Amino acid sequence: MADAAKPGDARFFTRTGPHSLSDIAAVLGIAAPGDARLITGVAPLQSAGPQDVSFLDNRRYAGLLAGTKAGAVILSTEFAPQVPAGTIALVSPEPYVGWARISTMFHPFPVAAGGIHPAAIVDPTAEIGADCEIGAGAVIGARVKIGRGSIIGPLAYIAEGVEIGVFCRIHAQVTVSHALIGNHVTLYPGARIGQDGFGFAMGKSGFVPVRQLGRVLIGDGAEVGANSTVDRGSAQDTVIGPGVHIDNLVQIAHNVTIGAYSVVAGQAGVAGSTQIGAQVMLAAQSGLAGHLTIGDKARIGAQSGVMHDVAAGEEVLGAPAQNARAFFREVATLRKLARSGRKTDKAGG
């Protein structure tokens, strides 16, 4: 069985290198360490060898540093004195960001191979940019525009009129309609973009569907995870800002706006017309009611049920969600009451 400890299995990931420490330092934006050795790969502290670069960002794993055999380690100034002999300390103000850049240096994202698979269906009015890759069974509708270097995976469906920017990665079985997508956007397998929002009028004779006449606008560098859904707007657009990262199994309803560089974790759901600011964090399984305003840099805890506006920078927890400090005070009070109740029961019985 293959060694599971080393990342970057060559069967699945492209590898570049070896790279010099000076080249690695240049990507990190730090001074070259003055060592001529070459680095061939990346690996965790516990499995890295003399030709690997590793990283340390979390204090919980500091104990592994003394025993590492890595050729170099990306870390903060705090941990640099603990680097063992023979290992080069690559001191970075943002070690994890540095690790992200260096791991991509050794294992770059796929680049479009260019060409349209014979089993793909491309409408003659579609505009396909240079060097695009269109996979087997993909369907590209009328008047679609796809920028150069983009990848459309197998069995993806790009509906009529959709526009996709340059160097996007649209993975297998994604469906996109009523959408304008920026550059360097990634849609992971099974993502559904631009379907009808959940809109209907309640009449005496039953439900009457409300036409969903908006679009989905996705900014540069955004990502939408596997099997996540982003509904198009009803009378206005659903907007996913630049750099937004949406995890797997997330529901974004019609007319929602998510500001730049916000993060939405798995199984979260956002109801219609809620406005989310920039750099907001929605933790796993959180749920936001409709027509709310969530301020910039707010943090929504896991499994929180948010039914009121959240101020910029505020952290909320619980269901119904409330300020995190108030939430923890209530939890502490309930624990004290529960303990005192147990003591009373023992004393009385």
Image (tube, rainbow, N blue to C red):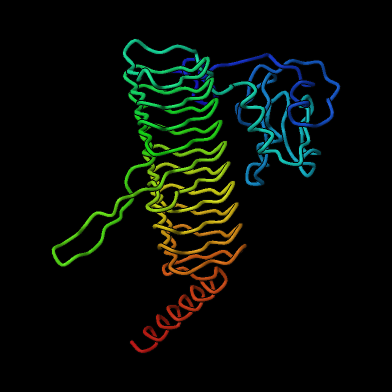
The furthest residue to the left: 205
Residue at 57% over, 64% down? 315
Q: How many marks?
A: 0
Residue 300 percent location from the top left of the image: 51, 59
Q: Quadrant of residue 28?
A: top right
Q: Quadrant of residue 271?
A: bottom left
Q: Is residue 103 depicted above or below 204 in this figure?
A: above
Task: Check the image and name the residue furthest to the bottom.
Answer: 348
The relative height of residue 312 versus residue 171 in the rendered view (above or below) is below
* Camera-nearest residue between 284 and 61: 284
Whether residue 126 sits left or right of residue 166 in the image: it is left
Percent from the top left, x then y, of residue 161? 40, 32
Question: In the visual, does 227 lie left or right of 61?
Answer: left
Q: Which sits in the foreground, 84 or 241? A: 241
Q: Position of residue 220 (x, y in %)?
A: 57, 37
Q: Quadrant of the C terminus?
A: bottom left
**Relative depth, front residue between 10 and 206:** 206
The residue that appears at 47% across and 64% down in the rendered structure is 292
The residue at 52%/24% (across/down) is 147
- Where is residue 263? Give x, y as percent: 53, 48
Q: Residue at x 67, y 46 (%)?
A: 59
Q: Quadrant of the N terminus?
A: top left
**In the rendered image, the vertical position of residue 313 relative to residue 228, given as above or below:** below
